[in-house]
């Protein structure tokens, strides 16, 4: 049996401001990981990544990141990905400041 | 200071115009990220965890007040009102928007600055002793040769696609404040037996994954021969350096794999071949550049006020004890402004602080500022009579921390709070260590201590050469901090030894505290520094301090 596939989200940085974004099921780029499509199938993950990378005029550096389903939607598994959902720890900058107001 | 000539000006403006068009083509979709990435990196633009980052070169760490004010303006206009000074004497902006970057570069060009070759496999910003031109122990100001190297390396057609990045550091004094032995090429100004000024040439130093101390390639290269000799080194490396494995591509590995004798022979051959081609033009240029680095008109004033202020104000006395260094001109001092307030982010200055420092340099400092690789700002030429006024102004701007060279004067890379390469955070660790030592009130008693933190193996935080080095790693999905001890980045450069297993983010600060308070009991007397004590006793007693429970387990 192949090892169990860890669910993934497609994530990237928005082209214009570099903000971390996640690919939603309906093909939007959201600044919130909780909006992301949680992908549980490896082949589908590869396909979604290819589709994401094709959107060169919207984002840069798309990749697959491990995630799990939480109470409000997908959550990061690794601390690096968790930092990307918040911002730096030394200043109240980035998403931790009113993430909903960002696009 | 060197001022851009027409050639520099035209070149930098042309690069800005080029990059503006490239950014437009990226935004309108005609360039893919793969196509755009090498172009943006050539202009110092990175994409990090939360945003873009623009790395601006501060050549050999020297700034004039107008440039510092422009850096403040850029921070306010296009970033979040602050900048981060780095271990390579650069400044980084952490929040630029892609579409604004060409305007930021244009604003830099307005004051004779750029972000060219602050990334990529090219010759990077040439760094220098931050006390250059001021230090009492200096043979000659190394910045003229650094400027010549900047002009030669900028857009040098042969060296735009080296096997890997290439860093050159220059110092004019035997006391090495520029970490020359941890650079691809380190140049140390020396005098030969005839009394002529020339350079000792060190190659193959570097930190990162495979830390190595540079080796002397030639004991003396005359000033006239320096540029062709350096070109010969880079040229040999360009052909011989490995391009199959990026972890083996730096010149330190080339040197290690081929042996210094082979490299030396190849460099000498290449040097013989290209030397005549320089035709003396570089010397004409150097003579011109040297004029721009002639010392300022030092003045003579009474220093009674300084002595009186020292007696009257203990806080001023403490600051002047730690933050001043010996100047070559009588009555003068070098002021190190600490950008390391306890609990603040090492190397960060707000735009207001930048303007205060620019004003002070203009009013009291012969119009000069420096950025040190230790992430502080220097006023190199200050008369002692003006120190009380400077101190008062610094205090108002929250810049009067008296901790230069002490435990809380920590070098830290941006780490995983910003950097896409990082494996752990470094800034919060630095903040917590500094805050803890401030609470303990022992750092003045502890004395000289260099703590350096990197958030990954690439070692931007110079952890290998910290007396105490901290390396942040990802151990099975958790931040983990490895300690090295006994490192030294001066003329006696030493790579620190790994102390043992790493510590969690919660345990690293108490571990550092045990090391430092334990050292107070281990030292012979107050004059023996942490590094000297470590060299005398070795790793064992420090290991016992770090891992007390293990000792008990062994004894049981």
Image: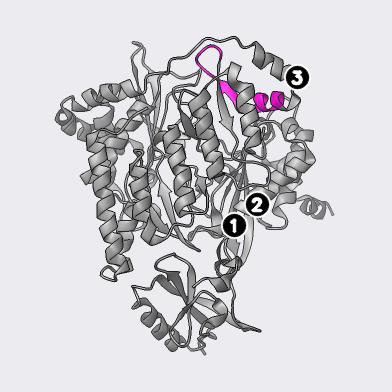
Say whether disc 3 or disc 2 marks the residue closer to the N-terminus: 3
Q: Are marks 2 and 1 in contact (CB under 8 Å)?
A: yes
Residue B283: horizontal and vertical position, in percent?
Answer: 23, 24
* In this rendering, the label closer to the viewer, 3 or 1: 3
Q: CA distance from mark 2 to mark 1?
A: 7 Å
- Residue at image x 65%, y 11%? B304
| Residue B203, quarter of picture | top left
Q: Earlier in the sequence, mark 3 or mark 1?
A: 3
Question: Which residues lie in the magenta part?
Answer: B316-331
Q: Is residue B324 above or below residue B115?
A: above
Q: In the image shown, does B474 or A81 lie closer to the viewer?
A: A81
Give the position of the C terminus of chain B as an image quadrant: bottom right
Question: Compared to B287, does A60 lie above or below?
Answer: below
Question: Alpha carbon of mark 3 to alpha carbon of mark 1: how far?
Answer: 42 Å
The residue lying toward the viewer, choosing from B492 and A94, is A94
Residue A91's x, y, as percent?
Answer: 61, 56
Apparent side of residue B419 relative to residue B553 in the rendered image (left or right) = left
Q: Which residue is mark 3?
A: B312
Marks 3, 1 in one chain: yes
Residue B313 placement: quadrant: top right
Q: Position of residue B461 (x, y in %)?
A: 54, 46
Q: What label sits on residue B429 in the rendered view? A: 2
Label 3 neighbour load within 10 Å: few <14, some 14-19, many 20+: few
Residue B425 marker: 1
Rendered image coloring scheme = one colour
Tell me the SS state at disc 1.
loop
Question: What's the CA distance linking mark 3 and mark 2?
Answer: 36 Å
């Amino acid at each position: 049996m192949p090892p169990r596939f860890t669910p993934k989200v497609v994530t990237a940085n928005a082209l214009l401001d570099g903000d971390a974004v996640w690919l939603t099921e309906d093909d939007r780029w959201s600044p919130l990981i909780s909006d992301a499509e949680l992908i549980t199938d490896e082949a589908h993950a590869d396909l979604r990544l290819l589709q994401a990378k094709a959107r060169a005029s919207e984002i840069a550096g798309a990749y697959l990141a491990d995630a799990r389903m939480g109470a409000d939607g997908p959550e990061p598994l690794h601390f690096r990905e968790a930092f990307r959902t918040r911002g730096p720890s030394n200043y109240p900058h980035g998403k931790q400041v009113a993430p909903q107001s960002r696009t | 200071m060197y001022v851009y000539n027409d050639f520099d000006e035209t070149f930098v403006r042309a690069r800005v115009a080029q990059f503006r068009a490239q950014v437009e083509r990226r935004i309108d979709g005609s360039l893919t990220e793969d196509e755009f990435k090498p172009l943006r990196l050539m202009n110092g633009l990175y994409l990090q965890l939360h945003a873009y980052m623009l790395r601006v070169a501060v050549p050999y760490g020297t700034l004039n007040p107008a440039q510092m004010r422009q850096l403040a303006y850029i921070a306010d206009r296009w970033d979040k009102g602050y900048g981060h000074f780095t271990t390579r004497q650069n400044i980084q902006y952490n929040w630029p928007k892609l579409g604004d970057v060409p305007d930021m570069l244009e604003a830099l060009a307005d004051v004779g600055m750029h972000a060219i070759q602050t990334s990529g496999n090219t010759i990077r910003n040439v760094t220098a002793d931050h006390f250059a031109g001021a230090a009492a122990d200096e043979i000659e100001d190394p910045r003229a040769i650094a400027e010549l190297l900047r002009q030669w390396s900028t857009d040098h057609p042969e060296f735009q696609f080296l096997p890997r990045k290439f860093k050159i550091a220059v110092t004019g004094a035997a006391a090495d404040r520029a970490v020359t032995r941890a650079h691809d090429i380190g140049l140390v100004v020396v005098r030969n037996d005839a009394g002529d000024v020339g350079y000792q040439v060190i190659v193959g130093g570097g930190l990162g994954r495979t830390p190595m101390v540079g080796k002397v390639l030639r004991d003396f290269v005359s000033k006239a021969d320096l540029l062709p000799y350096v070109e010969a080194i880079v040229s040999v490396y360009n052909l011989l350096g490995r391009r199959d494995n990026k972890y083996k591509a730096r010149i330190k590995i080339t040197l290690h794999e081929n042996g210094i004798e082979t490299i030396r022979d190849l460099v000498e051959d290449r040097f013989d071949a290209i030397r005549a081609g320089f035709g003396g033009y570089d010397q004409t240029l150097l003579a011109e550049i040297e004029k721009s680095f002639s010392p300022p008109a030092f003045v003579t004033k009474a220093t009674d006020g300084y002595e009186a202020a020292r007696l009257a104000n203990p806080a001023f006395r403490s600051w002047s004890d730690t933050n001043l260094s010996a100047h070559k001109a009588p009555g003068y001092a070098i002021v190190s402004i600490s950008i390391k307030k306890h609990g603040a982010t090492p190397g960060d200055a707000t735009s207001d602080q930048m303007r205060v420092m620019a004003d002070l340099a203009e009013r009291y400092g012969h119009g000069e500022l420096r950025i040190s690789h230790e992430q502080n700002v220097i006023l190199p030429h200050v008369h002692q009579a003006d120190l009380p006024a400077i101190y008062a102004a610094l205090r108002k701007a929250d810049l009067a921390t008296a901790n230069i060279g002490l435990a809380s004067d920590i070098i830290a890379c941006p780490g995983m709070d910003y950097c896409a390469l990082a494996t752990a955070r470094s800034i919060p660790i630095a903040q917590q260590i500094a805050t803890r030592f401030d609470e303990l009130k022992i750092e003045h008693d502890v004395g000289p201590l260099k703590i350096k933190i990197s958030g990954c193996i690439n070692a931007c935080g110079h952890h290998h050469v910290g007396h105490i080095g901290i390396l942040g790693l990802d151990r099975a999905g958790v931040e983990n901090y490895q300690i090295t001890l006994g490192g030294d980045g001066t003329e006696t450069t030493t790579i620190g030894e790994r102390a043992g297993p790493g510590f969690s983010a919660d345990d690293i600060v108490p571990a550092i505290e045990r090391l430092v308070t334990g050292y107070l009991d281990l030292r012979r007397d107050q004059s023996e520094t942490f590094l000297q004590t470590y060299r005398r006793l070795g790793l064992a007693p420090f290991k016992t301090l770090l891992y007390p429970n293990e000792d008990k387990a062994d004894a049981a």
